Amino acid sequence: MKRILLVAALVFFATSAYGVEKIGFVDLQKALNESDAGIKAKTKLEAVVKEKQAAVDEKSKEIEKFKTELEQQSSALSPEAKKAKQDELEKMMRDYQRLVKDSQDEIRKEESELTSTIISELRGITEKIGQEDGYTIIFEAGDTSILYHQKGLDITDKVLKRFNETHKQKK
């Protein structure tokens, strides 16, 4: 982080010496969240999360039901039967933990697949705008800890507009 800020400062001072200082920044996270493609991706991801959560909840209910039955039957079971039921409960718990982990991994993978293409396209559009409009440097707002900026430096809306227009033309 400090390295990015140091490089930015050096670029700024070097370009200032030559009288070139058109600098901007883009909030790619905002552009992702507000783009038409980003909204569709978020909706799709929410459906995946809902599906995975339903499976996890179902497994949790099965375990709770099994626990309740085991507690109720505990005094009537032989030590061998009780041990077998406890082993079965432990296996159910391991399966549950595996299901939770696998679900989280699948959600992360799906999110990455849904957003990586969009982010890549947003970066490409940002680069084109930078070239067309003569920017010396464009920062990504989330990566540089920008604490203050003039409103005119934020080109997020311009990138977002161009991205949505590009996607509407593709349809």
Image (tube, rainbow, N blue to C red):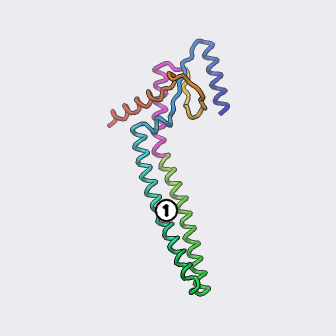
Query: Callout 1: 10 Å neighbours few (<14), some, many (20+)?
Result: some
> In what quadrant of the picture does the C terminus appear?
top left
**Label 1: which secondary element:** helix
Relative to 24, residue 110 above or below: below
User: Where residue 112 appears, x then y in whole percent?
Assistant: 50, 46
Does the magenta portion include 121?
yes
Quadrant in which residue 72 is drawn: bottom right
How many numbered badges does the structure rendering display?
Answer: 1
User: Where residue 142 appears, x then y in whole percent?
Assistant: 56, 34
Magenta region: which residues?
A: 112-135
- Left or right, 6 with respect to 74, comes to right
User: Where residue 48 appears, x then y in whole percent?
Assistant: 44, 53
| Magenta stretch secondary structure, dominant | helix
Quadrant in which residue 141 is drawn: top right
Does the magenta portion include 145?
no
Residue corresponding to mark 1: 56
Which residue sits at x=65%, y=22%? 10
* Three-letter code for the amino acid on which mark 1 is drawn: Val
Which residue sits at x=38%, y=33%? 164
Which residue sits at x=53%, y=75%? 68
> In what quadrant of the picture does the N terminus appear?
top right
User: Where residue 62 appears, x then y in whole percent?
Assistant: 49, 70
Quadrant in which residue 78 is drawn: bottom right
Relative to 68, residue 164 above or below: above
Front-most of 170 and 159?
A: 159
Which residue sits at x=56%, y=87%? 76
